[in-house]
Amino acid sequence: QVQLQESGPDLVEPSGTLSLTCAVSGASISSPNWWTWVRQSPGEGLEWLGEISNSESINYNPSLRSRIIISVDKFENHFSLELNSVTAADTAVYYCARMPGWGEGIPVAGGYFDYWGQGVLVTVSS
Amino acid sequence: QSALTQPRSVSGSPGQSVTISCTGTSNDVGSYNYVSWYQQHPGNAPKLIIYDVSTRPSGVADRFSGSKSGNTASLTISGLRTEDEADYYCSSYAGSYTYVFGTGTKVT
């Protein structure tokens, strides 16, 4: 059973950097998958932030491309999110999720998110 | 990249059927069969209930079904149960290696 667990500071100052890690268990982060970040602002809907594959191909939401970095640590079997220059609008529950993939090299994406972390609320405030 | 449009809420009585629409454009829902649906209970993470427009993952009740016509995808819940009361979100591949979610629908 694949499990994902987010961790990181729950409070970030405005203009600072939001940093989160998603620990993966029950699967190797080196297996053909796309490891994804999604957020949900309080009382709002879901927003896809970006993804990284096992082969370290990366795709970002165009609206965040100038502020976001997603990386993977194959030794620790986790992947990470950095979001720079945060404002109150970045206050949200941040989820990590898996999109299944297959194939060698850049994996073909399954197009859906089958495993999710429990989410972590990050508040941007001074 | 705009969010897919869903009704804010739908309601039904136990045993009835409800259908949730998810309207996109020819750049997302209309062009790809990578439409998925998620159920989210308050305080919980989303749960995958439909993928590839109409495929149910193992363990998901067959009361949940999905379809698509043109730029609009739909989720139907048949034989509504009290535990189906939740928020539902659609998602679609939007081209250029990006994904978009719907605005969400509260089922009561």
Image (cartoon, rainbow, N blue to C red):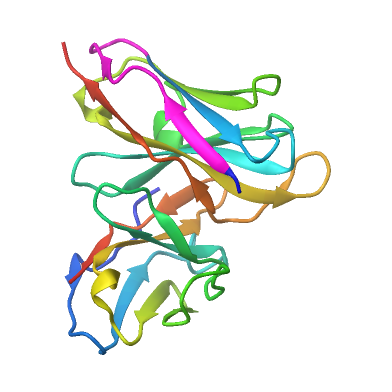
Front-most of residues A116 and B20? A116
Quarter of the view holding residue A74: top right
Task: Judge whether residue A116 can be spotted in this image.
Answer: yes
Q: Is residue A14 above or below residue A115?
A: above
Front-most of residues B89 and A10? A10
Task: Judge whether residue B97 can be spotted in this image.
Answer: no
Quarter of the view holding residue A51: top right
Residue B30 locus on image (x, y percent): 49, 69
Which residue is depicted at the point 54% across and 41% down?
A3
Which residue is depicted at the point 58% across and 56% down?
A111
Judged from this view, the residue extending furthest toward the right is: A104
In this picture, which residue range is highlighted in magenta? A3-17
Q: Is residue B4 above or below residue A39?
A: below
Assess whether residue B5 is covered by the magenta stretch. no
Q: Is residue A17 above or below residue A25?
A: above
**Looking at the rendering, in which quadrant would you find the C terminus of chain B?**
bottom left
Assess whether residue A12 is covered by the magenta stretch. yes
Residue B13 locus on image (x, y percent): 17, 85
Quarter of the view holding residue B63: bottom left
Question: Seen in the image, is A113 located left or right of residue A86?
Answer: right
Residue A63 locus on image (x, y percent): 39, 34
